[in-house]
């Protein structure tokens, strides 16, 4: 399903709160696909979700079509009316498929930049601050979630992007593993917990795709 007119700082948590309960695909490692420009980190104004069933998709359409979705932590006071449509799996796959190795390595650079943001610049340490390459990244984990969306659709070694995704995923995991925050602060502790959640999801996808644990 495609959702249009989403906020530029939308997060998976906002999407989950917006949707009816138990309508996302529960056996899917990454049912929410928030799209980024893979070179500068800008969030696109549309995204995709994978529903649990045709019945769940109908429920979403019946109860959430043209409803207002909250903005993210930066723009949370602004709500936008969203339109929702059924689309083919092929459309989603085509949207997620990288068109070049440069796109993938651009996404890796965003992952690396996002975890190096100085927390003092923004109100919450978990949000990427304007700085160089990641100046348009509005959420620390946005590039990592975009990478996991790609990984969730990777179809084995026959995929042209297989080894590039291997290298990029390895680099993203290493960047997240080596990021440091002062654990004594509340925001630092919260970020550390969220880092561990994202790391676990990334590692599970890495193992599923490449048959090995990432080296961290």
Image (cartoon, grey):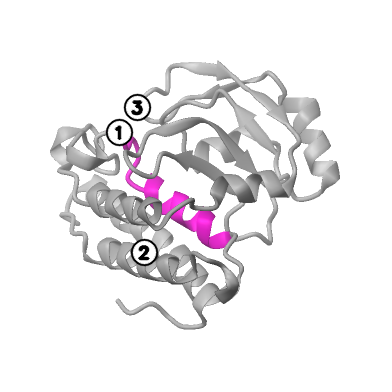
Above or below for 147 versus 3:
below
From the viewer's side, name the closer residue of 55 and 157: 157
Q: Nearer the viewer, mark 2 or mark 1?
A: 2
Q: Which mark is residue 74?
A: 3
Spatial CA span between label 2 and label 1: 20 Å
Q: Is 138 within the magenta?
A: yes
Vertical side of 11 occupied by 169: above or below: below
What residue does disc 1 label? 136
Q: Secondary structure at mark 1?
A: loop
In the rendered image, which quarter contains the C terminus?
A: bottom left
Instruction: Look at the image and give the residue range highlighted in magenta.
Output: 136-152
The image quadrant that residue 142 belongs to is top left
Residue tagged by mark 2? 168
The N terminus, quarter of image: top right
Q: Is residue 115 above or below residue 55?
A: below
Q: Position of residue 2 (x, y in %)?
A: 66, 35
Q: Secondary structure at mark 2?
A: helix
In primary-sequence order, the first of circles 3 and 2 is: 3
Q: Is any part of residue 168 visible from this angle? A: yes
Q: Nearer the viewer, mark 3 or mark 2?
A: 2
**Structural crowding at the residue carrying mark 1, measured as other residues with C-alpha within 10 Å and reported as few (<14), some (14–19) or many (≥20):** many
Q: Which corner quadrant of the image does residue 166 belong to?
A: bottom left
């Amino acid at each position: 399903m495609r959702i249009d007119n989403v906020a530029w700082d939308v997060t998976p948590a906002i999407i989950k709160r917006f949707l009816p309960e138990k309508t996302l695909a529960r056996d899917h490692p990454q049912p929410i696909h928030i799209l980024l420009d893979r070179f500068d980190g800008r969030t696109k104004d549309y995204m995709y979700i994978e529903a649990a069933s045709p019945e769940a998709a109908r429920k979403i359409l019946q109860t959430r079509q043209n409803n207002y979705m909250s903005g993210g932590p930066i723009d949370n006071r602004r709500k936008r009316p969203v339109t929702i449509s059924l689309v083919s799996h092929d459309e989603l796959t085509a949207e997620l498929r990288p068109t070049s190795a440069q796109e993938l390595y651009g996404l890796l650079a965003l992952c690396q930049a996002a975890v190096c943001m100085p927390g003092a610049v923004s109100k919450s340490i978990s949000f990427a601050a304007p700085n160089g390459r990641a100046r348009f990244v509005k959420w620390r984990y946005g590039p990592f979630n975009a990478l996991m969306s790609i990984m969730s659709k990777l179809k084995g070694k026959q995929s042209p992007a297989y080894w590039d995704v291997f290298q990029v995923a390895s680099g993203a995991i290493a960047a997240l593993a080596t990021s440091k925050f002062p654990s004594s602060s509340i925001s630092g502790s919260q970020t550390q917990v969220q880092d561990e959640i994202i790391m676990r999801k990334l590692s599970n996808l890495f193992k599923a795709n490449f048959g090995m644990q990432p080296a961290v």
